[in-house]
Image (cartoon, grey):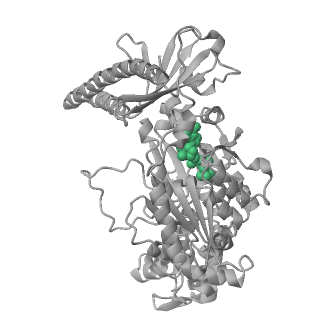
Amino acid sequence: MSEASETQAEIAIEQRHVDLVYARLDELRAEAAAMRDKSYEYGREATPEALNERDVMLNHANRTLQSLNAESEGLVFGRLDLASGDTVHIGRLGIRDQRFDNLLVDWRAPLAAPFYQATPEQPQGVVRRRVIRSSRERVVDVSDDLLDPDRAPSDMRVIGDGALMAALSRSRGETMRNIVATIQKEQDEAIRAPEGGVTEITGGPGTGKTAVALHRAAYLLYRDQRRLGGPGVLVIGPSPVFMSYISRVLPSMGEHNVELRALGEVLDGISTGAIDDPRTAEIKGSSRMVKVLRRALRLPPPEEPGELRIFYRGTVLKLESDELARIRRKLNNKGVPPNKNRMKAADALLEALWQQASELAGENFHPDREKLITEIGERIEFHRFLVAWWPALYPLQVLRWLSDPARLAKAARRLLSAEEVDLLAKAWTDPTEWTVADIALIDELRVLTGPPPKRREQPEPDPAAEQPRRPFNYDEYAHVVVDEAQDLSPMQWRMVGRRGKHASWTLVGDPVQSSWPDPAEADTARDEALSGQHAHRRFTLRTNYRNSAEIFEVAAGAVRDLVAAEELPTAVRSTGFEPVRRQVPEPDLVTATGEAARELLEAAEGTVGVITTMARRDEVRSWLSAIEDPRLRVVGSLDAKGMEYDAVAVVDPEGLAAESSTGSRALYVALSRATHLLTVLKPS
Ligand SMILES: Nc1ncnc2c1ncn2[C@@H]1O[C@H](COP(=O)(O)OP(=O)(O)OP(=O)(O)O)[C@@H](O)[C@H]1O
C-alpha cells in the first residue's frame, strides 16, 4: 500500500469512530433539551420544593447543553493505542455510549494524562499516540508518534511526522486557538498542577504561557466544578486587544464560567484601554501612591467652608478654622474610612459647639447639652455645613481634585518630587480620560474612602432586566490567573490581590519581557498580595513554539547582553525565511512602511502586525489607512504585549526601545511577535 493510501485507510478508521461520537452527541443534546423542558413543568407547581428542584434541573440541563454545544470543530482529536490492546479516544468532552462505556475521554480526565505525558523513554503503557485533525465533522489527517515499538503489533501503521510541527506551521487567525491536541509534556505538568496556593509559570516569548494558563483554568474547573464554578475564575491580562485575542480559547473548550478582564477593566462601571506615557505610568504605579492617596483623603475638600456659625437661643456659636482643623485632625487620626466617619464628624462638631456654649453660659443663657445637640443636629443649616465640610467622597472626584498641583504637593510632601507632582497633576486635568494606571488608584481609593452613601436618585433595579451574574465589584473569586504578571505595577498588584483574598492563583510571566522599571518593588507588592498563600510551585517552559528560529535569533539579539543565555527559550521550528532589515531615511519611512505592510500581506496567509512606538502609533496608522485588508493591525509596543501575528513589521526599533523605561526589553517583546515573517525598518 502506498503512503497516501495508508493514510486514507487510517483516516477512514478514525472517521467511523468520529461518526459514532457525533451520533451520540445528538442523542445527549436531545436528552438535555428534554430535561430542560421537563424542568419548566416542575416550575408550574410553585411549591418551594418544586421550584428548588426545577432550578437544580434547569441549571444542570443548561450546563450540559452549553458544554455539548461548544464549537464542534476538533471534538475528537486524539487516540491512544495501549500495550493492553485497548484504544482510548481523547476529546474536548467526555462522552459515554448507552452502555456507559467511554466513547470519548475528556482531555482533562486522568485516563487522558498519558496522551500528554508519555514519552519514548517512559511510554506509560502507550504504544502509539495519534493526533486526529478534523474540519468540522470530517477527519482530514492523522499524525502518529510510535512510543513503544517493541510492543507494537506487526500490522500497526504509523502515519505522518509530528502533529506539533504541523500545528505550528499553520497560519494564525484573528484569535488564539486551543492547543488541546498538541499540549507538550512540560506544559501539561503546569496545566495539571494541584490547584491550591500559587502556581507560577515562567518562560520566554512564545513558550505557550498564555495557552497553558487558559488550559489550566479549564482543567481546574473540570476537576472541581463545585468549588470553582460558583465563585468563578478570573483571568487578568494586559489589554482589551489581548483579552479579545484570547477570548475564544475557553468557550471553544466548553468553559463559560471564566471572567476575562484587562487591567483597565478590573473595576465595574469604569473601563479604559488608555495608557499613560511611561514616566507618568511609573509614578502612578509606584507603591508610594498608597501614602499619597491616604494623605489626600485627610485634606479638607477644595471648597471647605472657613467657619461654622450657628445662632442658638440668642447666642452666636462659632467654630473657626483652627478649631475646625483640630477636629478634622482628630477624626482623621481614628483611621476610619472617611465615608464611614460622617456621623462621627457630625458628633464632633456638635460636641465642640456644646463646649463653647457651656463656656458662654451665663445669666441669660442656660444651655442643656442634650437639647443643644438634638436641636442643632436637626437644623438644615448644620447639615448644609456638614455636607460641605465633610462631604461623601467618591474616588473619581478625589483623584480629580489632585489635578490641583498645590493640593497634590501637600499630599505628596517628601514622597514625590516637584517634577513628579507636575506630571501627575497634568495627567489628571482632563475630566474624561482615565488611564489603565488610574484604575488601580481608583480601586485603592474605593477601599480607603469606604462606601459612599447610596445616592437617592439611583433607579430601582428593573426586575425584568437580566441581572448581572455577579454583584457590583465582586471580589470573591476562587481562582485568579494573572497573565503577563511581570508587568503589573505595585498598585496593580494591590488591586488584583483584592480580587482573590481567598483564592488560589496561577501567575504567568517572563521577567525578561518586563516593562516595569523596578521589579524589586513590584515583587514586594506581589508577595504582599499573595501573603496568605502557603504552597508555591514553579514551572519553567523552555521551548518557543511561536517564532521561527530565524526570527527568534533576531529578537534574542535585543537582550543577549542583559540576560543569561538560559533565560532565553529555544525556538524549535526553522522556516528558512530570514528576517529582513532595512535602513530607511526618515522622510522615506512612510513609503517604506506601506511597502513592507503590502509585501507581508501578500506573503502571509494570516494576520500582519505593524508594531511601532506608542508615540508614533496613530501617525503610522494614518500612513497605512489606504490599505483596506482586515488582516492588518497597527499597534504600539505596549499593545503588542502577548499578541501574535503571522508576519510583523517593526517600525523604528531604536525609538521603541528609547521610549520605554525598560529599553531593549520592550524591543525584544516587539520582535518576538511573529510566527513566520519579520521585517525591521530602521529610520536613519
Ligand atoms: N503545545 C502547543 N501546540 C501547538 N501550539 C502551541 C503549543 N504551545 C504553544 N503554542 C502556540 O504558540 C504560540 C505562543 O503561545 P502563547 O501566546 O501562549 O505564548 P506566551 O508564552 O504566552 O508568549 P508571550 O510571552 O510572548 O506572550 C501560540 O500560537 C500558541 O497557540
506 relative to 23, above or below: below
Determine the image quadrant of residue 665.
bottom right
Quadrant (top left/top right/bottom left/bottom right) for the C terminus: bottom right
Residue nearer the viewer, 507 or 130 = 130
Residue 251 location, x and y as percent?
42, 41
Is the residue 581 above or below the residue 589 in the image?
above
Please provide percent x and percent y for residue 337: 58, 65
**Which residue is most to the front?**
2
Q: Is residue 54 visible?
A: yes
Question: What number of labels is visible?
Answer: 0
Quarter residue 279 falls in: bottom right
Q: Nearer the viewer, residue 438 or 125?
A: 125
Residue 22 x %, y %: 33, 24
Location of residue 477 with respect to 99 vertically, above or below? below
Tell which of 212 and 321 is nearer to you. 212
Location of ligand 1 given as a quarter of the image: top right
> In x, y percent, where is residue 142?
48, 26
Question: Relative to 268, is 508 on the left or the right?
Answer: right
Residue pictured at 67% horizontal, 57% vertical? 555
Which quarter of the figure has residue 300? bottom right
Does the image show residue 450? no
Q: Nearer the viewer, residue 52 or 605?
A: 605
